Each structure stands twice: as C-alpha cells, then as structure tokens.
Image (cartoon, coloured by chain):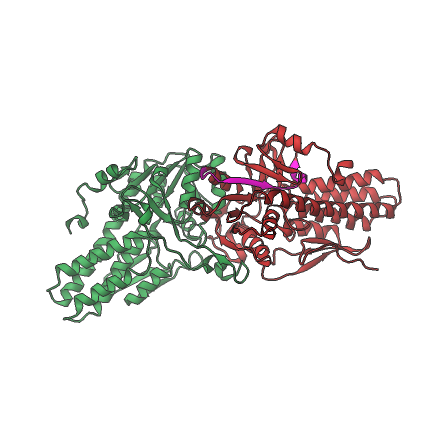
Chain colours: A green, B red
Amino acid sequence: MTEPARFSQPYYAVAWHGDINGHLRILDQTRLPSEIVYRDCKTVEEVWQAIRSLQVRGAPAIGIAAAYGVVLAAQQATQPGGPDAVLKACDYLATSRPTAVNLFWALNRMRQVVGRVHYGNVRDLQNALLREAHAIRDEDAAMCRRIARVGAQLIHDGMGILTHCNTGALATAEYGTALGCIFFAAEEGKRIQIYADETRPLLQGARLTVWELMQRHIPVTLICDNMAAVLMRQKRVQLVLVGADRIAANGDTANKIGTYGLAVLARAHGISFYVAAPSSTFDLALPDGKGIPIEERDPREITEPLGCRIAPEGAVAFNPAFDVTPAELITGIITERGIIKPLTHATIANVLGSPRKSKEADQ
Amino acid sequence: MTEPARFSQPYYAVAWHGDINGHLRILDQTRLPSEIVYRDCKTVEEVWQAIRSLQVRGAPAIGIAAAYGVVLAAQQATQPGGPDAVLKACDYLATSRPTAVNLFWALNRMRQVVGRVHYGNVRDLQNALLREAHAIRDEDAAMCRRIARVGAQLIHDGMGILTHCNTGALATAEYGTALGCIFFAAEEGKRIQIYADETRPLLQGARLTVWELMQRHIPVTLICDNMAAVLMRQKRVQLVLVGADRIAANGDTANKIGTYGLAVLARAHGISFYVAAPSSTFDLALPDGKGIPIEERDPREITEPLGCRIAPEGAVAFNPAFDVTPAELITGIITERGIIKPLTHATIANVLGSPRKSKEADQ
C-alpha cells in the first residue's frame, strides 16, 4: 500500500512518498516560477545533487531533504554493514553545502538513530530512520507555525516590510520562517505591503518569494537589491524580516548574501531588523559568527545569469553565497520559543536552554 | 571629402562622421560586451531612440549625442523655418530621458547657437551647430582628462576601489569620469584592485565597466550589488568612486540606482565616498536634490532581464533608474576644476563660479 505524501499545502519543497520502500519527492526550485516540476529522488546521490544544485534550498528544507536522503541510503543497506553504510551516507550528505547548520543538525539526529538501534535488524533501522526523518519534517512544520504566530505580533496594519531571499514554504517543511510571519499577519487580516529583494545572483526573491506571496494574494513589489536603501529613505519600509542559515551563540547570523548590507541600512534609517529561524538554526558550539563557513559558489552564477553571459570572457567574479550579520545590528530573533531580544549569550541561552517541547530534546 | 570620425581611442560611445553632411555614429551599448556594434544615426528620431533605449548612456555622452542630434535636425532645415525646426528638435530631444542634466545643458547650448545666428542663412546655422556640438564633445573630453588627473590624487598604491554602474569612456566623450580617475591612477603605475558592482537592472557594471577595465588590463572583480557591504566589512575597499547624472547646488547627487545605499554603507564603514563629474553635471538652479526628477523605467527591466522572465506573470516591480545621495554622505566631488570638499553651497559656488577656461563660459 502506498501512503500519501506528507504535506498539507498546495505545494511543498520536500515530501516523502510512500512507506519505507518509498522515495523523496522535491519541487525543483530552479525551474520556478515558470514551471512546477517535482522530481523523485531514489538515491542518496540524487539528494546530494538536488541540495548542491539548489533544486531544494532553504536551511530547514535542506535538513529535511538530507534526513530523507539517509533513509534512501538505508534502503540499500545489508544486514551486517547497514549501520556503517548509513553513517557514511550521513558524512556524504554533509558535504553537499557548508553554511546552513540545519543540514548537520538533521544528519546528527539521523546518526543518533543509528547509535540507538545499531544492534537491531536492518529493517528496524530503516523504520527508525524514516520515523526520525518524518519527525524532523513534522517538528519543522510545527516550529514554523509557532514562529509565524510569534513574529506576526511585530507586524502592524499598514506596514511596509522588506524581505530578502526566500523564507517561505519553499524553504521549510511548510509555511516558512520570516515569510511565515508575513503569511500569518495577512491571515489575521492585517493590510501589509511586502517588498521583495530579487536576491542576486540566483534570484530567489524574484522567483520564489514573489511567487509564494502572489499565491496568497499578499501585495508584493519586487525590487532589485540595490533599491532597498531608497525604500527605507522614502519611509516605505518599517520592518526588515529575514531568515537565517546559521546563528552563533552570540546571535551573529549567517544568511543569504546581501543580508548584512540590509542590516546596516536598516540601522542607519532607524528601522527594526528581525531574523526569524527555528532553534535548529542555532549553532551554540560557535561563540560568534567568525567561525561560520561561508560557501563560495561558481562565479558563473554572476557572470552568466539565466544562461546568458553578461560579463566579458575571462572576467573575475566574487560569489559568496552568504554573509554574517553581527548581533549588534539585529533587533531580535524570532524563534518558535519566543523572540530573543536583545541579543546576548545570556538571552539566547535562556531561550534555547529551556526544556524543549519537541522530540529532539529527548535524544 | 569625408572627414574621419572625431575620436582618439580604440572604442568610443559617440562620434560624428564626416563634414556638415555627415552623421552620428554610436556604439550600441546594449550589445556589449558580447558584440561591438556601431550604429549610424541619420535622423533626430534615431538619436532620440538611441538615448531612450540606452544604446548611448552616461550623462556626458547623452549630452553629446543630443547635440549632434540637433545637427541632424538642422540638416533637414529649410531657409525660412530653419531656426524654429532646430529649436523644436531641441525640445524633442529633451524628452528622451529626464534625469541627467547634461542633456538639457547641451541642448541649451545648441539653442543659444540658434539665437546667435538666427538671421544668417541655413548653411551658416548648420555649420555653427556642428561647431558647437564638436565643442561640447571636445570640452567633455578635456574635462574628463582633468577630472582624471585631479581624482587620481585620491588613489593610492594598493587601494581597493568600489565603483557602480559605468563612468568610463563609454559614458563620456572619452576616458571617463570616476573610471577615468582609475584609468589615470593605473597609468601612473599605481597597483589597484577595482570592484565593480554589476548594477542591476541593466548590468552596466558587469557589461561595460568590467569590459573597459579589462581592455586596459586593470584588475577588476565583478560583484553583485548586494555584496558591496561585505567587501567593506572585510576592509577590501578603501574608496568608493561613482559618477553623477545631476548635482544640485548643495551637492545632493542623483546617480544610478544603488548609489545612495553605497554611500550609507561607506559612511557606516568609515570609507571615503567620492563623486566624479564635470561641471556640466551641476544644476545650480536646484537648491537641493528634492527637485531632481527621477526616471522610472519599464518594470520588465527587472522582471525580464536578458529576455528571460524571472518573476511570475503579473508581478509588480518598482524600477527607479536613479537615486539621490544627500551631500552629507559625500566626502567630496571631483570636478575638472578641483575637488569640492566639504560640500556646501559656498564651496560649490566657489569652485563652479570661478572663471571657466573652456568655451562654455563665453556664452
């Protein structure tokens, strides 16, 4: 019997289809918004490639996809070598992208499952891994709903809100983080105007965020990244709301390239700058943002956007995929456990150190 | 006999070919860097279209192209109606683009020629207009050389310099303004590293600035506009150097969209921010930048870059082509008469009010 896909919305970034013999299905986000194409991933290599090539992206969604990738590896596992093969798959998936900590967090949870059921039979291991991957997915969905509810309190009727990259249902199990707060506020009936940075080089804002907002009939105006400052000066923006790929113990936040500049601009214009992220995005092992590895991607993403060469042959380009915004520029961080504000080691530890309601605290 | 084109470099934005019966030739900058295509403009309508469609762009180059456009109109003029037809052509060309004041400045010089030779025969008028257009072009070339020499004093060995849009030979009669300073410093043997903002939406930085710097073997790294802040934080940039489309009497400066944000970022990082522009870019009739009209262009420049749709059908986009940087964020303005610094009505009037060495002061 084939189980239905685990999702509760008209589109989804990532979902498991079927039972333990099933497979991962992802929405190929490189084709949006012109085409809605779902791809079936039946091997761990296909999942690695889907993450690397940004068919699936967004820190929480990457973690979920990787967890299901481990299940695909386990499907091939034999009785004696099963646990080792699964751990190797975890190591392999960890090489797909370096910055988003949710990837490593999810893979560590899958590794812990191997540790727990190491001496069981391989079918038990497979079932336990699938249950854990489902749990990671379901917990992310629940965290996003809570983040949205918490963050929507910051959004008032009539506000102009600037966002960067994509932090919606496409970046998470469902609903989203920063964009989830916006969805929730709109569902509450607040009239808001969103400004979406197109987010060069890969244009996730133009392609994904505008698409998600239009699906929900929330007013959105697309801008080039270099137009944000003018909107702030014209007082058309009262709040900047972004996601995160990794947050250090002091609140320094790695997010899509361009975020740091927005934070500086927001400060200069006296505008609140909030990050929305689940607790799985915190990396408390890092005292500050200096230790966050920043992925540098192929310069052709800049020199050949959309397959068209815009710079001369041989041009040199610099293409960091992320930057780090220092905690002192961040007004607060919206988590599923409340808003952390102001940002200090103590306030962060205080919120994140509290007993977790979700399952991950038990492991 | 056909005279050669009036230029002194391997490529040029705009040049007159031939004698009074000649025509304007422009480099179609929308095709760069993939193709070097020169277009002959033989009617005033073709010049208007070339300016509107950005085949020729850059405030000084627009002014020169418009001046030669007036000559093309005069070629068609008949004896009795000649002056009126030429004045109408000036009015018409003034509608091509609203922000760069050099356009109106050049057209006003052409109108003054009509006033002076109004009662002469039409051939005299044509010759006087061609001489004036040549003078505008030659004076711009001379001003650029002086700006370059003045501005290069600010550039030191080992500097990283960030620039935005294109301010080189392609934007002027020859050599350039902000980019001219960089060319001059490199010719002096200073080792410098240029960072070029790609400059969305029309990518003049990627397509034109990188191309001009590579022609001259000056090290240049292309970045997306949203990466500038990170370069500043990493202390890879010690100077920001941009051009201008219109400067008000208090120093408020309209320039390519994104310039204002760079100025805010430069200030936040303690980095000098200089504008380089000829005196023809000042509009002393405007007390401050509030009166500068900002061209808003087709949103499809954002939603359909390079002919590819990146945003969903029906997406709304905001596409101002320029922004205004307030004088207090500008360290100084590099003109052909020296550096104006600090920027006040008095310091600006002091430099611009001094006797002009070039011909325009006589009119």
Q: Is residue A242 above or below residue A267?
A: below
Q: Quadrant of the N terminus of chain A?
A: bottom left
Indicate the position of residue B83 as horizontal and vertical percent values. 83, 42
Q: Is residue A306 visible?
A: yes
Q: Is residue B349 left or right of residue B111?
A: left
Q: Is residue B28 left or right of residue A241?
A: right
Q: Is residue B278 magenta?
A: yes
Q: Is residue B350 magenta?
A: no
Residue at the image point whose x is 50% and y is 54% from the top: B222
Image quadrant assignment for residue A33: bottom left
Q: Is residue B257 left or right of residue B357?
A: left
Q: Which residues are magenta?
A: B268-282
Residue at the image point whose x is 53% and y is 42% from the top: B259
Indicate the position of residue B191 as horizontal and vertical percent values. 53, 52
Q: Residue furthest top?
A: B346
Image quadrant assignment for residue A242: top left
Residue at the image point whose x is 23% and y is 53% from the top: A136
Q: Is residue A66 left or right of residue B324?
A: left
Indicate the position of residue A211 as horizontal and vertical percent values. 42, 51
- Front residue (pair B120, A64): B120
Q: Is residue A175 visible?
A: no
- Front residue (pair A278, B247): B247
Q: Residue furthest left?
A: A119
Q: How many marks?
A: 0
Indicate the position of residue B61 as horizontal and vertical percent values. 67, 48
